[in-house]
Amino acid sequence: MIGQLKMSDAPCPDSRNLVLTGFMGTGKSTIGQAVAGRLQRPFIDMDEVIVQRAGKSIPSIFADDGEETFRKLERSLCQELARQTGLVIATGGGALVAPDNRAALGHNGLVICLAADPAVLVARLEGDQNRPLLATDDPVQQIKQLLQARTTAYQSLPHHIDTTYLSLEDAVEAVLTLWNKHCM
Ligand code: S3P
């Protein structure tokens, strides 16, 4: 409404990072970018940083160096980002499955886990060529197995938003509402 400040536009002086995590296809990067714009903060897409530094795509890192190497790069980036403030960060979908990475980014960040219905994730991820974990004979089964294997890790995160039925605009509002609610 004209002349009225939306709750999510109220300035929050919190210097912690705002961290979006959750399974592939839940909208972390798109929503994170838009949230960073609204908060006028730098946006860090962890996968993009890893790709830039490695000089090759994520499928190439997995193919040439193995998932283990990718997880090491991810882990050291978590440690690095945990020493910074004022960022909006989108993690890769598996980054915060490891407890030490959850602890690192949660130490000085508000961590929000995005989720969506498995059927919607399957539709969003169908035909994707950039996610090596889904390059199997049966990607649908793989999505279900990975979701199940990660349930406990994701559930242990402090805040959750289901993006299944949310437009980008609504998802951004939901993140900003949580951010302002937990502003320190
Ligand atoms: C992964 C998710 C990907 C990327 C890598 C591994 C995972 O990121 O980090 O392919 O383990 O779930 P997105 O969640 O951005 O697709």
Image (cartoon, grey):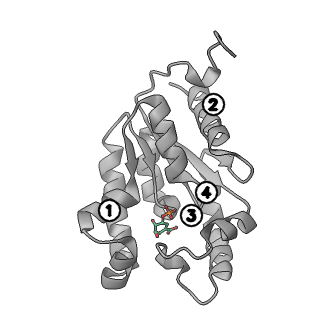
- Mark 3 sits on what residue? 24
* Quarter-of-image position of residue 168: top right
CA gap, disc 4 and disc 1: 20 Å
Q: Amino acid at mark 1?
A: Ile
Ligand 1 closer than 8 Å to label 4 CB = yes
Q: Quick one: SS at disc 3? A: loop
Give the SS element for disc 2.
helix
Ligand 1 under 8 Å from disc 3 Cβ: yes
Label 3 close to label 1 by CB (< 8 Å): no
Between the C-alphas of marks 2 and 1, the distance is 30 Å
Q: CA distance from mark 3 to mark 1?
A: 16 Å
Secondary structure at numbered mark 1 = helix
x and y percent of residue 78 in the render?
A: 36, 54
Q: Position of residue 154 (x, y in %)?
A: 61, 57
Q: Label 2, on which residue?
A: 177
Query: Is 147 drawn above or below residue 10 in the view shown?
Result: below
- The amino acid beneath tag 3 is Met
